[in-house]
Image (tube, grey):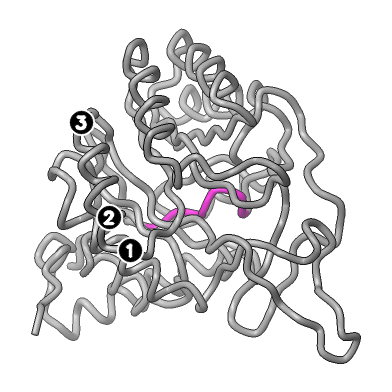
Amino acid sequence: MINLKSKIGQFEFGNPLMNASGVWCENAEKLDEMKNSSAGSFVTKSATPHLREGNPSPRYVEVPLGSINSMGLPNLGFDFYLNYSLKFQQENPGEINFLSIAGMKPEDNLEMLHKINESDFKGFTELNLSCPNVPGKPQIGYDFEATENILNKVFEFFKKPIGVKLPPYFDIVHFDELAEILNKFPLSYVNCINSIGNGLYIDTENESVVIKPKDGFGGIGGAYVKPTALANVRAFYTRLNKKIKIIGCGGVESGKDVFEHLLCGAEMVQIGSHLAKNNTNVFDKILAELEEIMEQKGYKKIDEFRGKLKSL
């Protein structure tokens, strides 16, 4: 019998799969489908304090190896996602979900975190420091001083389990510097990675870009980003203290992709572009493929190989 259980903090999940925030989670209908899927857990759409329409369309386009998007954080507003999460918690005793927030400015995040702190929400809060698709708003995750400042303010009052969603990093020095900062805080997890920001995809027939916002610049997801995602998972797994777990995200389309994320050290693995391109049935297929790989290799549970990537 293959055991696919994963654990972050005091919470155990039946398997390591989740959606990525932004995919299959924007409204009650999609969240219900995630809730009823075979995924181990789910995360809500990154919320701003109030309803937000996001960027003009076309803003999400499927491309051969993944997707390009500049959604601009469209969402139904923080209260909707908090209330959905509280209802889920009430109707499913012992189960929790992840609640993602992404304020347009640090004060927005602190305001939402105060509300979560004062609520009955028992799950994980995910602080998104990495949305690359809001015109004029830089990604906080690339400003290490700002990242440390906001985490200092958060942990002055926030008493519930919380993780951060990070942008991709590309320099060894940046892995070192950010890990040193993150290790100062009692984070439950870090989520690596958000989309690779400000890519460009060209429609050669029309000699044009394919999305409208930001002159066609958008976040790249899917198979394009898997090597970068794996590198970030591995870099932070080997640098962060072991109380801080890793959620891997990027390029996951098969059980083999999940196995690679777990081998690099991920505790949970999220699916974004591939889920958006298909539906929640992808979880069944990918879990079956993961079990098959583990069976072939003689693994009975994920902890037997998690993080045990071999160097040459």
Reading the image, the residue beneath label 3 is 184
Which disc number belongs to residue 175? Answer: 2
User: Residue 101: which quarter of the image?
Assistant: top right
Image spot of residue 221 (x, y percent): 56, 68
Question: Residue type at mark 3?
Answer: Lys
Q: How far separated are the C-alphas under marks 3 and 1?
A: 21 Å
Image spot of residue 306 (x, y percent): 16, 63
Q: Which residues are magenta?
A: 17-23
Question: Residue type at mark 2?
Answer: Phe
- In-image side of 162 versus 43 (left or right): left
Image spot of residue 82 (x, y percent): 57, 24
Which disc number belongs to residue 308? Answer: none
Can you say whether 266 is above or below 45 in the image?
below
Q: Name which of mark 2 and mark 3 comes first in the sequence.
A: 2
Q: Residue at x 44, y 36 (%)?
A: 126
Q: How far separated are the C-alphas under marks 2 and 3?
A: 15 Å
Magenta stretch holds residue 21: yes
Reading the image, the residue beneath label 1 is 171
